[in-house]
Image (cartoon, rainbow, N blue to C red):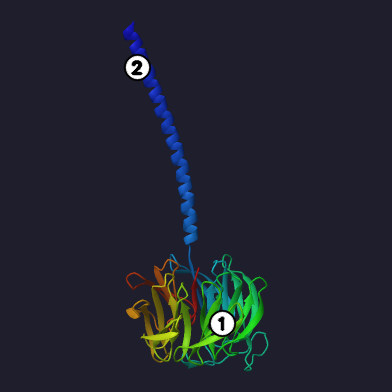
Amino acid sequence: MKKFMMVSLLFLVSIFIAACGTSSDNQTKGTTTESEKSSQSEKDKSEKEKTAFIYTAEQGAITKLDATSNKIIKTIEVEGSVHNVQISPDGKTLGATVVPGTGGHGEQTCSECNHEEEHGEGHGGDEGEHGQTNGFALFYDAETDQLIKNVEVGSHPAHIAFTENMKYALVTNNEDNNVSVIDLSSYKVIQSISTGKGPHGFRITADSQSAYIANMGEDTVSVIDLVGMKESEKIVVGNTPVTTGVTPNGKTLVATLNAENSLAIIDLTTDKVEKVPVGEGPAQGYIQSDGKYAFVANQGTPDKPSASVSKIDLKTKKVVATIKVGKGAHGIVTSNDNQFVYVTNMYDNTVSVIKNDDNTVIATVKVGMEPNGISIK
């Protein structure tokens, strides 16, 4: 009897354990399934967030590239010469500057391009201060690539940039010696601020308080106070500054000096300027997001094109790499994670893709005519 009871007890215990095991397994399987779904959802979301697009400014068009495949996915036709493109900080808007007619990239005498430019007839707009037809700032929805607004600005608009707080977009008007301030809530020009001669490339500080504008017609950078809406000072940097860059902490400014074949590095606490030799005819410069390196696209001239990018360590103020790219390297930008550097080659009609960690060109993409400005979403 005792033996029978023991066997029965063992049998019941084994059933209980098996049941617990089955229940536990089922719960585990259920949890794993939900976890996998959640993980997949997060992965899909992450992949979507990581999707990046490259935009290049060209004669009569903006080319959109998939940054994963490095293939063209769309060509946005534009009337006139697209001088510069820029994605907004929130990634939702693409801005572009357009010079009406068939006039090429650059100013009347473009030191950046080192050749004379002729401006064709405009497509509307008033005459600028120097008898030139006004240009435009175009704003596109970055998701649909549809035009949101066409805003008339000044004569020969050069570069466009957005404030980090998305209140304003600024456009430099090279032949009017000023910068247009566009209110992004209404897409209307609310202010024109005087600069030095030949304002061109510029960057805005991370706190949206100041813009640093390279004045190609002189040796200065205009400091624009975006609170008081005025030029607060000029910093003498060197001969023919083309573009600027500002470190994320707002302490260091760089400016490419086209006529000196160098990059000016300015300590903004003292305005002390140090110059680093780069390649021939430097055009645009760009500081990667952590402020460690600055990159300079060396364009040269049509007769003597340069074909290199200089990589400068901002701490040591030395060139740590010179990377061979296409002819007429002009626009430059880094990916948001700093893994890649993208360069437009004006005289080859291509974009070079550089792997940042080993300074090698991993792809060359054929795009439209005379690609110059470049931006990444």
Outermost top residue: 1
Marked residue nearer the N-terminal end (1 or 2) = 2
> Residue 361 placed where, x, y %?
35, 73
Q: Bin the neighbour count of mark 1 within 10 Å (Cα to Cα): few under 14, some 14-19, many 20 and up.
A: many
Number of marks drawn: 2
Circles 1 and 2: CB atoms closer than 8 Å: no
Can residue 112 be seen? Answer: no
Circle 1 SS class: strand
Separation of disc 1 and disc 2 at Cα? Answer: 86 Å
Q: Which mark is residue 10?
A: 2
> Residue 55 placed where, x, y %?
50, 73
Give 62 or 23, whichever is nearer the viewer. 23
- Three-letter amino acid code of the residue under disc 1: Ile
Quadrant where the N terminus lies? top left
> Residue 363 placed where, x, y %?
38, 71
Q: Which mark is residue 224?
A: 1
Indicate the quadrant where residue 108 lies: bottom right
- Three-letter amino acid code of the residue under disc 2: Leu
User: Residue at (64%, 94%) from the top-left corner?
Assistant: 131
Q: Is residue 255 left or right of residue 124?
A: left
User: Residue at (34%, 9%) from the top-left corner?
Assistant: 4
